[in-house]
Image (cartoon, rainbow, N blue to C red):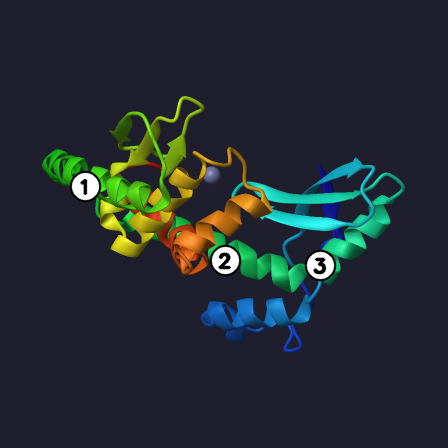
Amino acid sequence: MYLANARSIDTIPQSPFGDSSFYQKEPSLLNDINQYECPFDEPMIEYTLIKSRRKTISLEVKEDGLIVRAPNRTTKREADAFVKKHEAWIVKKRRQIAERKAMEQSVPRLSEEELRVLSQMAKKVIPERVAYYARLMGAHYGRITLRCQKTRWGSCSAKKNLNFNILLLLTPPEVLDSVVVHELCHLFEMNHSARFYERVYAVYPEYDRWNRWLKDNGNLIMARAGYR
Ligand SMILES: [Zn+2]
C-alpha cells in the first residue's frame, strides 16, 4: 500500500482578523476559510501498486480501494504522478460506486411469497422461450434447471444442460430472450469466440443492447433477492 499525494498537512493559517470573537460566533465560516487557505490539505489517495511485465499503467477503482497496475520498472514517483493526474476520474468513479451501492441497499427486497410466484412463472416462461429458440436454431439440449442465483443469469454445461436464473423474470422479455439465445449458442460453441457471437447475432441481432441493459441493471435486480 502506498500513499500518493502525501504532503505534510499545512497548519491552520492565522486568522487575518487576529483572535477575534467573530470566528467563535461563526464556526461554519471558520471552516470554509480553513479549507480555502489549505488547498493542499485534501484527502490522500491510497492505492495498491501491482507491478508486472505489462507495458502500460492502468487504474481500477474497486469498492474497497484503488489498484494501479504498472510495468516492473515503474517508480513510486511515477505511479503517484499517474494517480494524481487521474484524480478527478477516480473521484467520479468512487462516487458512482457509492451511489450504486446505496441504491442496491435501498432497493425493496422480494418476499418469500414473491420469490415463490417468480419461481412458478419462471417454470412456465423460461422452458417455452428455450424451446422456441432451440427449434429456430436446430439446437438439442438436455435438462433445464431454474434457480435464484447471485452470480449468473444463465449457464450451459458440457452435458448440454441449461441453467437459468429465475430473476430474469424481473427483466424485460428481450433480456430473457438474449440470455436464452446466449446459452443455446454454447451448445454449438463452448466459448465466447467471434464465431460464438456471430451465431448469437444471427439469431438475435439486438443482443448487445439487451446485454448492456443487463450489465447496467442486473446488480439492482440481484439486490432485490437480498444478495450483495
Ligand atoms: Zn457464455
Residue shown at the point (9%, 36%) measured from the top left: 113
Alpha carbon separation for disc pair 3 and 2:
29 Å
For disc 1, the marked residue is: 110
Q: Quadrant of the C terminus?
A: top left
Q: In front here: 2 or 209?
A: 209
Q: Is residue 52 above or below residue 25?
A: above
Element marked by disc 1: loop
At which x and y percent is residue 203?
40, 52
The three-letter amino acid code for the residue at tag 2 is Arg
Label 2 sits on residue: 95
- Residue 40 coordinates in the image, percent (x, y): 71, 62
Q: Position of residue 39 (x, y in %)?
A: 68, 67
Instruction: Identify the residue at the far top of this view.
Output: 159
Q: Nearer the viewer, mark 3 or mark 2?
A: 2
Near-viewer residue (6 or 214): 214
| Nearer the camera: disc 3 or disc 1 | 1
Q: In the rendered structure, which amino acid carries the disc numbered 1? A: Leu
Q: Which residue is mark 3?
A: 11
Q: Secondary structure at mark 2?
A: helix
Quick one: 170 or 130, which is closer to the camera? Answer: 130
For the N terminus, the quadrant is: top right
Give yes or no for contact between labels 3 and 1 (Cβ–Cβ under 8 Å): no
Q: Is residue 104 left or right of residue 82?
A: left
User: Can residue 225 be spotted in the picture?
Assistant: no
Residue 145 percent coordinates (x, y):
27, 27
Locate residue 82 relative to residue 172 in the image: left or right: right
Observer-nearest of 182 and 76: 182
